Amino acid sequence: MFPQLRRRGGTLLSTDGIWQATDTLSFHKVRGAHWALCYWREYPMGWANVKQTVRRADSSRHDQRLEQIGAMPDNFSSQTFLRWALSSHAIGHVLTGMNNLLGDGWALSSQVRWRSRKPVQAFVLRAEPDIATTVHVTQPLQTLDASALHLGLRLKGLIQTRENWGQHLSASAAAQAYYDRYGPRPDHKQETPNLFQPFWMARQVPVTP
């Protein structure tokens, strides 16, 4: 066991559309108690807990676990860190050192609310989405100075000989974004195209009038 600098955090999005982000940075130092019990003494260095402001005061599972432990002490002038961990049933966290428990608690007590008008609404795609984009480009003939280019375009039928023609070149192209999973799901279930997976490809398609 060696002292370590641990950064923990993540972004959560509940089924109700509640968005929350947490981030902590703590220094964990190995301490001994009567040489028989070694534990991680956590020294928080940075913490943040940002949550979306909504009408319903919902709590994420992350915050609910912290609320069950109780309020984190501001300092340990009246009790030791190990005594607090034993009394708050958090001894498992300080023995493994895999969590920034104290930093998470301080972040929760100073939680920042991100102002928003309403919860995030999920965007549902159709079973077979047809997301196509068409691009039209035009170029005036006055910009073509080379006579050989004029002749080549006329031979290919791209420029008509009539004087009342539109006097411009035009081109159109269309592309389509489609969902293509590289293989079947491990659970053998049918997957609906969604924006949470990166299996989106692009292909050229005929231009429709």
Image (tube, rainbow, N blue to C red):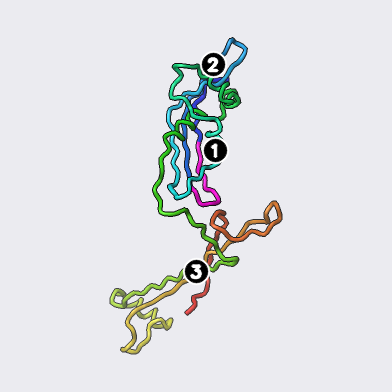
Q: Which residue is mark 1?
A: 64
Where does the magenta region start and end? 9-18
Question: How many numbered marks are there?
Answer: 3
Amino acid marked by disc 2: Arg
Relative placement, left or right, of 134 versus 196 is left
Q: Which residue is mark 2?
A: 31
Q: Secondary structure at mark 2?
A: strand
Residue visible at 42% across and 70% down in the picture? 135
User: Residue 90 location, x and y as percent?
Assistant: 57, 26
Residue visible at 49% across and 17% down in the picture? 79
Quadrant of the drawing holding the N terminus: top right
Residue visible at 46% across and 35% down in the picture? 108
* 102 is higher (above) or lower (below) than 168: above
User: Residue 148 location, x and y as percent?
Assistant: 35, 77
Asked whether residue 54 is drawn in magenta, I would say no
User: Residue 173 location, x and y as percent?
Assistant: 46, 72
- Residue 145 appears in the rendering: no
> Which is more toward the observer, 145 or 97?
97
> For mark 3, does the 10 Å Cα neighbourhood hold few (<14), some (14 to 19), or many (20 or more) residues?
some
Contact (Cβ within 8 Å) of mark 1 with mark 3: no
Which is closer to the viewer, label 3 or label 2? 2
Which label's residue is closer to the chain start, 3 or 2?
Answer: 2
Residue farthest to the front, as pictured: 56
Q: Which residue is mark 3?
A: 132
Place residue 74 in its image quadrant: top left
- Residue 49 appears in the rendering: yes
